[in-house]
Amino acid sequence: MKWKDWDQNLKVRLYGEAVIGILFWMFFPFMAIYFAEIFGKSTAGILLVVSQCIGVIANLFGGYCADKFGRKKMMVYSYLGTSAAFLMFLFANSPWYESPVLTFISFSLLGVFGAFYWPASHAMVADVVPEKDRTAVFAVFYIMINMSVVIGPLLGGIFFFNYRFELLVAAFIISVIFTIVLQRFIRETAPNVVEDKNKESKDDKWYSFLIEQVKNYSVIITDKAFFLFILAGILLAQTFMQMDLLLAVYISESVPSQTLFNFNNWSFVASGEKVFSWIIVENGLLVVLFTLYATKISERFEAHRVFIASALTYGVSMIIFGHTLQIWGLLLGMFIFTVAELMAVGIQESFVAKLAPKEMLGQYYAAASLRFTIGRTIAPLAIPLTVWFGFRWTFIIIALLAFVGAGLYYAMSVLMRKQEYI
């Protein structure tokens, strides 16, 4: 699908989300380190779990609302909330007032409003892009996200610790601008909303919203293959969610300063914090360069086979991370980790669209994103696990979860054959 054929909604979002993404990744990877230093590792892990539990609920409501009230409305309201959360965030880190507790609340609210935004945004892509082009379009958006992952942490290493207030002021202003852009320059695409926007019932009770949502999600749960896809994804998320959690703490605490290059009398020495920034950039750069190529290769194979291979590769990368403190070993681990990511990332969203009824796209995407919201809810427990079992065994446990996830993907494929999806 050529750029000139892209819907205006997608073009506006791609540019806007790219800028927002860079700002987000300028502070997000460093939050686990910040909370661990302020509250201690055990408390930080528990607090992050609590914040993500709220995000899970918001995600489910976000998917329902995207189908019921429209993609555009939910995206605009989400960024209104995001702007308010950034305002609170900058206040809690201002020259006049500092509050780690308010910082945590603000950070949690950003996750909640993000959980409202993404089901609607994913469903909008499926609304306006033909099925044959969806994988490529989703891949382009994923490349954009990872360009943010490359640029954001490099800038964040400077601004987050030295100019945090100014960074958050910029994030607030740009969030407000993006809210206005969404309101003015994108149109509604939800089929039910476009067709029935003048047919709203005035007799609905206050609780009918919740009852209808529960009924709709109960239908999704009866789709056993899709349920296994979610469950396997939750287990697999325990690997890739650790990039800014366990891996950040592990490298900053355990990796000693060491020489990366040594030439005659010149040497380049890197601390743990610098190594962490480098492997984040390595991941983002590889994804930016090879996502489209990897997606073309993955499309040649049955989706479930790709998911199984990806899960096994993620597990191997976790074992490597847990058994090395050397820079080159960590860079190798991240390379294998990124290969696992590239295998599956381009085909996941189109896979969900293939399973979902058209009138329930938003809810299927919301349910599918439980892989990430529930995954991120559980993932911070890895930080207190290091206190009880140590870093090496924690990485082994996470690798075992990835291997179990591969087994669930296999079980999913068996059910899909019975249901004649494949």
Image (spheres, rainbow, N blue to C red):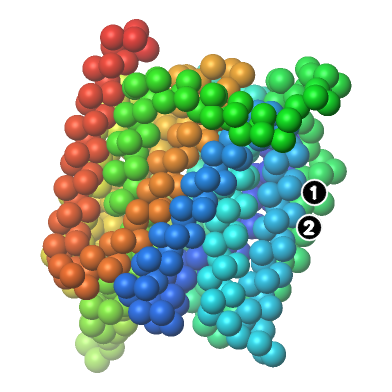
| Depicted 28 relative to depicted 287: above or below | below
Q: Which quadrant: the N terminus?
A: top right
Quarter the C terminus occupies? top left
Q: Residue at x 26, y 29 (%)?
A: 409
In the picture, measured across the screen, residue 313 lies left or right of residue 121, that is left
* In the foreground, 3 or 149: 149
What kind of residue is marked 1?
Val
Check residue 181 in the rendering and tell me which mark sits there, or answer none. 1
- With 106 as the anchor, is 276 left or right in this view? left
Q: Where is residue 246 in the image (x, y as percent from the top left)?
A: 31, 65
In the image, what residue occupies the spot 67% across and 58% down?
82
Q: Position of residue 200 (x, y in %)?
A: 81, 23
Residue 420 lies, in percent from the top left, at: 34, 8
Q: What's the residue type where badge 2 is placed? A: Ile
Label 1 element class: helix
Report crowding for label 2: few under 14, some 14 to 19, many 20 or more residues within 10 A (C-alpha): some
